[in-house]
Image: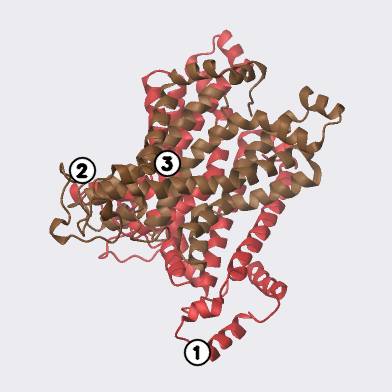
C-alpha cells in the first residue's frame, strides 16, 4: 500500500502545483467535468428542465411515446411525459444516494480501520473479523433483503447499502495505518506523549486523505450503480418521483420500438458513474496510490 | 504438511465467518419492526392464525433460543420451511442453485480467459494503443450497470439481429432433466446429448457476457498492473540482463507471480458478482436462485430470504476458500505465511 511520502506531501500543500498536475491529467479532468456538470444539472434542475410539471404523476396521452425531437430532446414516455426533464430530476436521487451512503460509511470505516491498524491485538482481530463477515454478504442481496423486510424506500436502500459499505474503507485504512504506525513521525509523537486520538486523527489520518479521496470518488460511482439496480428491481425510490433505474425498468417493456424510454435514462446512469470513476482513476494517478480500487 | 496446517486454519476461519453471517442474517430477520408471521399471512389473516404460525415458527421463544434453533438447523444444513409454500427452503434452493452456479462458473471462466490475456497485452505494450484500449474497456465495463448491459444485449442480439435466444436455459421444446450435477452443460455431455449441449451454450452466451464483462475488465486491469509491478522486480531485470528472450521472460517468470492479484481480487469482488447475477437472471428469465429470491422478497417470505442470503454468503466464503488454496498453489510463500490479510 502506497502513501504519500515527504515530497508528495509538499506537493499537496502547494495548491498551484497540484492544480497544474491535475489539469494535465486528461482522465481526472474529464471525470471532474462530468461530475460537476451532473451536480450542477441536479441542483439547478428547476431552472433547466423544459417541462417542470412532467416530474410528478402528469399524463398527456396525445403525446405519449414520441421519439426524441426538438421539443422533447429525449422523447416522451408511455404517458406522454418529457423524458429529458425527468432524467435531469432523477439525477438528484442518483446523487443523493452516494452522499448519504458514503457520509455514513466513510467516518465509520475510516475510524475502525485506524483503530485496527494502530492498536493491533484484540482490537485488530475483532474489527477485521467483523469486516470479513460483512464482506461476505453481497451488498445488492443485502439491500434487497432489507428493502423486503422493511418497506421499499430510498431511505431503507441507503441504510442497507451503508450497513455493508464501510468494510472497504476499513480494509483500506487498516492497511495504510499498519504501515505508518512504525514510522518515525508516529514514534516521535508517541515519545512526546501525544494522546492516542491525536496520533490517530492528526498524525496518521492526514496521510490517508489521498487514498480516501480516490476511494470515495470510485465508490460514488459504484453506489450509484447499486442504487440504480435496486430501483430497477422496484425496491428503490417509489414512483412517480423520477429515478433513472425505475425509468430503465419501465421503458424496458417498450423495447426496441420506443428505445429512448429506457436507453437514454440508462445512458444517464452510465454518464454519471463514468464521471466518478474517471475522476477516481485520475486522482489515483495524481496521488500515486496504485492499490486503491 | 505445512499446506495441511494452512488449509485447516483457513477452514476454521471460514466457519467463523459463516457463524458471524448467521448472526447478522438472524438479526435482520428478527429484530426488524413487524411480526414475521403477520407479514407472511398478510393483513387479512385472523389473530388466531397469526398466533398459530408464531407458535409453529417458535417466535414465542426467547431470542437466544430462537437463534439456537436457527443455528442448529443450519448446522444440519436445514434452512427451515418457506412461510408461504410450506415447502422446505433447502429443496427450493437446491432446485434453483445449479442454474445460478452454471451461470457463475461460465462467467468466471469467461472473465479469466479474456481478462488475463488482455491484461498481459496491455502490460506488454504499456502506454501504446493496446494498453489504452484495454484501460478504456476496463473503465467502461466497470461503470456499465449490469441490468442496462443485459437489456441492451437482449435487444441487440435477441430482437434486432435475432441470432441468440434471450430467455431461459433451454428452448421450451427441448426436454432435458439435468439430474447428475444439475449443470446442463456437464450433464448433457455425460449423457451424450450434444444437441442439448449446443442449445445450453447458446442460451448461456448472453447472460454470461452481461454478467462477466465487468469482472473481465477488472481482471484485465489488475493483471496489467501486477505484470508491470513484477516486471520492475530485480530478478526480471536480471533475466533481461542475461538475455532471456522476451516471451520466455513474460510467460515463464512474470505470469505466475502476476497471477495472484487477479485471483484474490476475483474472490473479493465475488460478492458483487452474485448480486449482479440476481439482476441478470431476472432479465434473462434464468431459472436460478435470483428468481426464487426475488419472489421471496416481494412476498416477504422471511425464511426463504434468510436462506437465499445465507447461501449467497456461504457461496462467497467457499469461493474465497478455494481461491486461497489456489493462491497457495501458485505462490508457495502464502502457504507458510498463512494466507492473505
Q: In which quarter of the image is residue A95?
A: top left
Decide which of B211, B31 is in the foreground and name it.
B31
Give the label on residue A73, or none.
2
Which residue matches tag 3?
A: B214
State the hue of chain A: brown
List x then y, in percent, for residue B29.
58, 68
Decide which of B245, B129 is in the foreground and name it.
B129
List x then y, in percent, for residue B54.
59, 83
State the hue of chain B: red
Q: Which chain carries label 2?
A: A
Do the residues bearing badges 2 and 1 touch, measured as CB atoms within 8 Å? Answer: no
User: In the rendered image, which quarter contains the C terminus of chain B?
Assistant: top right
Label 2 sits on a secondary structure element that is loop
Q: Is residue B189 visible?
A: no
Alpha carbon separation for disc pair 3 and 2: 30 Å
Q: Which chain carries label 1?
A: B
Alpha carbon separation for disc pair 2 and 1: 53 Å
Decide which of B223, B303 is in the foreground and name it.
B303
Do the residues bearing badges 3 and 2 touch, measured as CB atoms within 8 Å? Answer: no
Amino acid at each position: 500500500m502506497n502513501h504519500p511520502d515527504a515530497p508528495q506531501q509538499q506537493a499537496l500543500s502547494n495548491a498551484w502545483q497540484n492544480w497544474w498536475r491535475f489539469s494535465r491529467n486528461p482522465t481526472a479532468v474529464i471525470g471532474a467535468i462530468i461530475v460537476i456538470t451532473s451536480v450542477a444539472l441536479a441542483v439547478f434542475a428547476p431552472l433547466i428542465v423544459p417541462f417542470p410539471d412532467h416530474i410528478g404523476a402528469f399524463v398527456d396521452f396525445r403525446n405519449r411515446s414520441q421519439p426524441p425531437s426538438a421539443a422533447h430532446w429525449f422523447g416522451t414516455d408511455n404517458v406522454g411525459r418529457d423524458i429529458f426533464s425527468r432524467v435531469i430530476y432523477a439525477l438528484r436521487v442518483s446523487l443523493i444516494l452516494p452522499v448519504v451512503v458514503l457520509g455514513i460509511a466513510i467516518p465509520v470505516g475510516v475510524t475502525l480501520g485506524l483503530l485496527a491498524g494502530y492498536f493491533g491485538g484484540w482490537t485488530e482481530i475483532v474489527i477485521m473479523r467483523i469486516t470479513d463477515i460483512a464482506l461476505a454478504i453481497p451488498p445488492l442481496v443485502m439491500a434487497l433483503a432489507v428493502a423486503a423486510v422493511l418497506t421499499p424506500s430510498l431511505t431503507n436502500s441507503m441504510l442497507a447499502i451503508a450497513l455493508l459499505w464501510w468494510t472497504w474503507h476499513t480494509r483500506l485504512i487498516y492497511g495504510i495505518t499498519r504501515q505508518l504506525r512504525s514510522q518515525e513521525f508516529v514514534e516521535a509523537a508517541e515519545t512526546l506523549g501525544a494522546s492516542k486520538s491525536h496520533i490517530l486523527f492528526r498524525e496518521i489520518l492526514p496521510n490517508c486523505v489521498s487514498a480516501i479521496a480516490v476511494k470515495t470518488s470510485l465508490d460514488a460511482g459504484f453506489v450509484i450503480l447499486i442504487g440504480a439496480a435496486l430501483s430497477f428491481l422496484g425496491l428503490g425510490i417509489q414512483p412517480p418521483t423520477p429515478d433513472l433505474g425505475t425509468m430503465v425498468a419501465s421503458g424496458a417493456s417498450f423495447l426496441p420500438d420506443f428505445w429512448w424510454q429506457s436507453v437514454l435514462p440508462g445512458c444517464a446512469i452510465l454518464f454519471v458513474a463514468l464521471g466518478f470513476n474517471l475522476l477516481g482513476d485520475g486522482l489515483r494517478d495524481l496521488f500515486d496510490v496504485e492499490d486503491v480500487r | 504438511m505445512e499446506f495441511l496446517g494452512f488449509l485447516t486454519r483457513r477452514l476454521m476461519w471460514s466457519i467463523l465467518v459463516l457463524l458471524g453471517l448467521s448472526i447478522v442474517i438472524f438479526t435482520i430477520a428478527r429484530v426488524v419492526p413487524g411480526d414475521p408471521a403477520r407479514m407472511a399471512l398478510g393483513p387479512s389473516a385472523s389473530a388466531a392464525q397469526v398466533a398459530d404460525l408464531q407458535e409453529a415458527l417458535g417466535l414465542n421463544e426467547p431470542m437466544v433460543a430462537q437463534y439456537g434453533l436457527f443455528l442448529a438447523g443450519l448446522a444440519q444444513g436445514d434452512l427451515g420451511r418457506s412461510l408461504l409454500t410450506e415447502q422446505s427452503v433447502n429443496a427450493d434452493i437446491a432446485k434453483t442453485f445449479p442454474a445460478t452456479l452454471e451461470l457463475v462458473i461460465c462467467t468466471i471462466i469467461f472473465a479469466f480467459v479474456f481478462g488475463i490475456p488482455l491484461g498481459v497485452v496491455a502490460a506488454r505494450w504499456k502506454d501504446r494503443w493496446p494498453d489504452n484500449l484495454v484501460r478504456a474497456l476496463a473503465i467502461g465495463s466497470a461503470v456499465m450497470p449490469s441490468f442496462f448491459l443485459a437489456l441492451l444485449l437482449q435487444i441487440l442480439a435477441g430482437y434486432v439481429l435475432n441470432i441468440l435466444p434471450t430467455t431461459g436455459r433451454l428452448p421450451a421444446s427441448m426436454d432435458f432433466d439435468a439430474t447428475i450435477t444439475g449443470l446442463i452443460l456437464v450433464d448433457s455431455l455425460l449423457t451424450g446429448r450434444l444437441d442439448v449441449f449446443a442449445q445450453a451454450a447458446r442460451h448461456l452466451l448472453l447472460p454470461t457476457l452481461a454478467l462477466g464483462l465487468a469482472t473481465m475488465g477488472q481482471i484485465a486491469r489488475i493483471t496489467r498492473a501486477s505484470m508491470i509491478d513484477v516486471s520492475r522486480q530485480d530478478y526480471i531485470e536480471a533475466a533481461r540482463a542475461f538475455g532471456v528472450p522476451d516471451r520466455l521472460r513474460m510467460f515463464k517468470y512474470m505470469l505466475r507471480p502476476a497471477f495472484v492479484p487477479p485471483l484474490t481480487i476475483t474472490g473479493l469482488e465475488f460478492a458483487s458478482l452474485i448480486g449482479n447475477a440476481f439482476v441478470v437472471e431476472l432479465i434473462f428469465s434464468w431459472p436460478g436462485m435470483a428468481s426464487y429470491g426475488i419472489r421471496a422478497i416481494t412476498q416477504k417470505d422471511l425464511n426463504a430470504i434468510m436462506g437465499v442470503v445465507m447461501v449467497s454468503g456461504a457461496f462467497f466464503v467457499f469461493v474465497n476458500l478455494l481461491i486461497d488454496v489456489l493462491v497457495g498453489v501458485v505462490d508457495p510463500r502464502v502457504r507458510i505465511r498463512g494466507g492473505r490479510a
